[in-house]
Each structure stands twice: as C-alpha cells, then as structure tokens.
Amino acid sequence: MAIAATANGGTPDGTHLRAVALPILIVVASVVVVLGAERLFVPGPDPLISGLARDDRVELYKQISVIAATTMGFVIAAVAILASLDPARPIVADLRRGEAFALLVANLLAAVLLLLLVSVATLIGSIVDDAKVGSHAFENTVEILSLAAMAEFVLGGSLFGYVTYKAARF
C-alpha cells in the first residue's frame, strides 16, 4: 500500500519523525539493556567486558572492529544500491512513495553511523585499553554501541526484506 506524498513532494506526514525516532529508540533501548538488565543478570557492578583479562579484552575489541567494519561495508553497498534505483521505473516510484522505503534508508544510514562508531571505539579500545582493569565508562559505551548497531542492522535487514518482498509482488 503506497502512502500519498505531501504537497511539497516530501514523504508522508510523520515518516520523517518515525525515520529519526526509531534509531534513537533503539539506542535508548540499548542503554537500558546494558545499564539496566546487565545489572540484574550479571553479578557485580562491572560491565561484561571488564570480566575479561586484558589480552582477551584487546582481542575482543579487535574482532568486533573487524566485524563492524566489514558489516558497515555491506550496509553502505545496500544503501548505494537503493539510492541508484531508477525512479522512472513504476515499481521503484511506487516503493519510494511508501513509508517502508524511507524507514529502510534511514535505518540503514543509522546502522552505518553506529557501525562506524563501534569500529572507532573498538580500535581505540584495542590501542589504549591495556590496563589490568579497563575503564567501565568506555566498556559500557562499547557494549551500548555494539548492541545498538546490531539492532539497527537486524531492523534494516528486516525492512530490506519487506521492501524487496513488496517489489517482487509487482
């Protein structure tokens, strides 16, 4: 079902708000999970990453950095493909009028940003987190960014599947 565009040629009312609010909601939910639920299920006040030995922590940062950067490349490719779709084709024009397409692009761009932040944070962590006990604030930040990036990636993939399904029906 295509939603009619607004008079100024933009997306329907509320789409921009939902496109921005959904990634913010995912980041807030990640904060709640890491800072709230982790305290309920993990004994002690320390973040999960703090329980690792220094060398293991550095290795974890390196592995997360590689995975985040690689995943970011795939998501950038997906956004590039979506941006290059020919708007003159009726199927593409109909998809772009729908709300799901705008949400898809917004979520994929949010995933790219979060994956970039995860890559940078874990690269920094692999270089500077060499203390016997790491910085709890930094480790919480890495956990929050990683969880939020993963959630955005999953949501973006789901929206991509939905938009692709809609395109295949035509």
Image (spheres, helix red, strand yellow):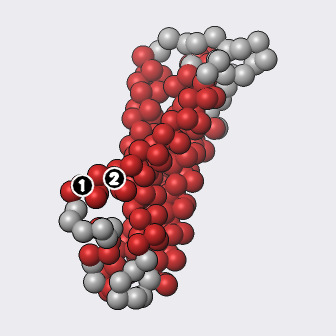
Looking at the picture, how far across and down is residue 107, in whole percent? 52, 40
Which disc, if any, is residue 166? none
Instruction: Please name the residue shown 52% across and 41% down the image.
Output: 23
Q: What element carries label 2?
A: helix
- Can you tell which quarter of the image residue 40 is in? bottom left
Disc tally is 2
Three-letter amino acid code at disc 1? Leu
Above/below status of 75 relative to 101: below
Instruction: Please name the residue shown 29% across and 52% down the image.
Output: 37
Q: Residue furthest right?
A: 8
Looking at the picture, how far across and down is residue 67, in whole percent? 40, 64
- Front-lying residue, 3 or 41: 41
Residue marked by disc 2: 36
Instruction: Please name the residue shown 55% across and 60% down the image.
Output: 116
Looking at the picture, how far across and down is residue 55, in whole percent? 32, 86
Above/below status of 23 relative to 55: above
Neighbour tally class for label 1: few under 14, some 14-19, many 20 plus, Cα within 10 Å: few
Looking at the picture, how far across and down is residue 1, in whole percent? 50, 11
